[in-house]
Amino acid sequence: MPEVGPEDPAALFYTSGTTGTPKGVPLTHGNLRFQTSTILGADLLEESDRILLPLPLHHVYPFVIGLLTPLSAGLPIVLPRSLTGPQLVRALKEGEVSLIVGVPRLYDALFSGIEERAKGGGRVAASLFDRAMRLSMDVRRRTGLDAGKLLMAPLRKRIGPRLRVLASGGAPLDPALAEKLEGMGWRVAVGYGLTETSPILSLKLPDGGKLASVGRPVPGITVRVDPSAMPDEEDGAERTERPNGEGEILARGPGVFSGYRNRPEETEGVLDEDGWFRTGDLGYFDDDGYLYVTGRASTLIVTEGGKNVQPEPVEEAYARSPAIAEVGVLQKDGRLVAVVVPERDEVGDDAGQAIRAAVEEGSKRLPSYQRVSDYAVTREPLEYTQLGKLRRHLLPERYDRAKAGDEGADAAPVPSPSRRWRRRTASFWRTRGPARSGSFSPAATRRSRSPRYQPQLDLGWTPWAGST
């Protein structure tokens, strides 16, 4: 075998392409070695741990954190037979899994499946679950004590008796969901980083605190915030106060890549001569040194009134309507507009009127500067990356096409997301059977932001039923 050094390339990954063409990211042996050493030194793993890895290995997060790190520690890795709810529960039990390397949508589906089963178990089971969850979260919030270990023991025994840590990465984890998972008696660890940083920049250990943060920078990595990346808001604009100022997150250290493959100009745009990498993410530090990520610089919209708007909170407000299956917000000619996909089961034959009423209702939930001034209705689902991120660079073309009449309000709406999920087995998992198990495609079902249609894993049992 040829000798290799720390600067020699070890793997080639590609960025997700949410805002443009995916770029090749070569990572060196030194990059990967730094990451595995960092995680092993973070007291996150125990000698008796068994790791469940239900993610595709062509992404840097599962490859490095879910595969290389456990192998470096000599820990067993459990791969589910197929990615359905019952098979995941089977893997958790029979594999005696103690830690999952997952993404937020997996944990959302897991908790939603538990919640749905509780509701389907009758009034007594639903009431017991609701009261136990509220008490567990309240005790955890007020005292820091882990009441969920006792209160939720019957549930956790049915899902995975040894499961203790849920490691989340790849996308932001909703703090409300993290609190619910902690309320179940599990500990939540959150990592933040990018493909270009191989991937971890910061790590929030499973200590139950600061669930909205992504933790502190890992040893060896220097992170700073550049406020100059934030556009100036005009006088009188409503501001969100941050303890130490918000700006673009910059990082430097042995985990940072040295440049895109065959893209020197794009490399120069994100990596300076001193080794500082511009992540393109916006965030801030609190007084305890914890990092909070507030959005992408590339998706930040500056309104004509000089106010800064991130599209995701706006989309979530409008998607609360049962008439809206999907929505993408963008800026057009200085105005805030949206591409809207109707929900077929809700809008009936008159999609135009139903969407108009839904948009008016959604606007009431938002301050005036965050309300869309116009929208276009399309029958085609919006496009997402394989990890479920909206391809925002395609929205302007979709908006123009719909406005031009190629896809109007009278076009046939898309099927219900819940029905699409059912047709493709459980939630966002695509099951290909034993011969091709391990395939993962959260985008295969098209992501819906509507809280009415949360992804759910069919766990195959009812909470507390026969679990005394």
Image: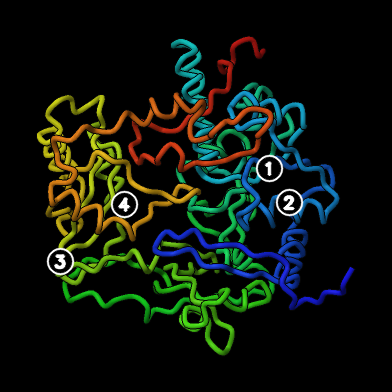
Residue extending farthest front: 406
Q: Which residue is mark 1?
A: 53
Query: Is there CB contact under 8 Å for labels 1 and 2?
Result: yes
Q: Measure the alpha-carbon separation of dots 1 and 3.
A: 45 Å
Query: Is there CB contact under 8 Å for labels 4 and 2?
Result: no
Please tell me whether mark 1 sits on a helix, a strand or a loop: loop
Residue 84, by quadrant, is top right
Q: Which residue is mark 3?
A: 333
Relative to 332, residue 320 above or below = above
Other-residue count near label 1 (Cα within 10 Å), few / some / many at <14 / 14–19 / ≥20: many
Q: Quadrant of the C terminus?
A: top right
Please tell me whether mark 4 sits on a helix, a strand or a loop: helix
Q: Amino acid at mark 3?
A: Asp
Q: Which numbered marker is on residue 218?
A: none
Query: Is there CB contact under 8 Å for labels 1 and 3?
Result: no
The x, y position of residue 141, in whole percent, is: 52, 43
Is residue 206 shown left or right of residue 117?
A: right
Q: Measure the alpha-carbon separation of dots 2 and 3.
A: 46 Å
Q: Amino acid at mark 2?
A: Leu
Of discs 3 and 4, which sits in the foreground?
Answer: 3
Q: Which residue is mark 2?
A: 67
Answer with mark 3 or mark 4, whichever residue precedes in sequence: 4
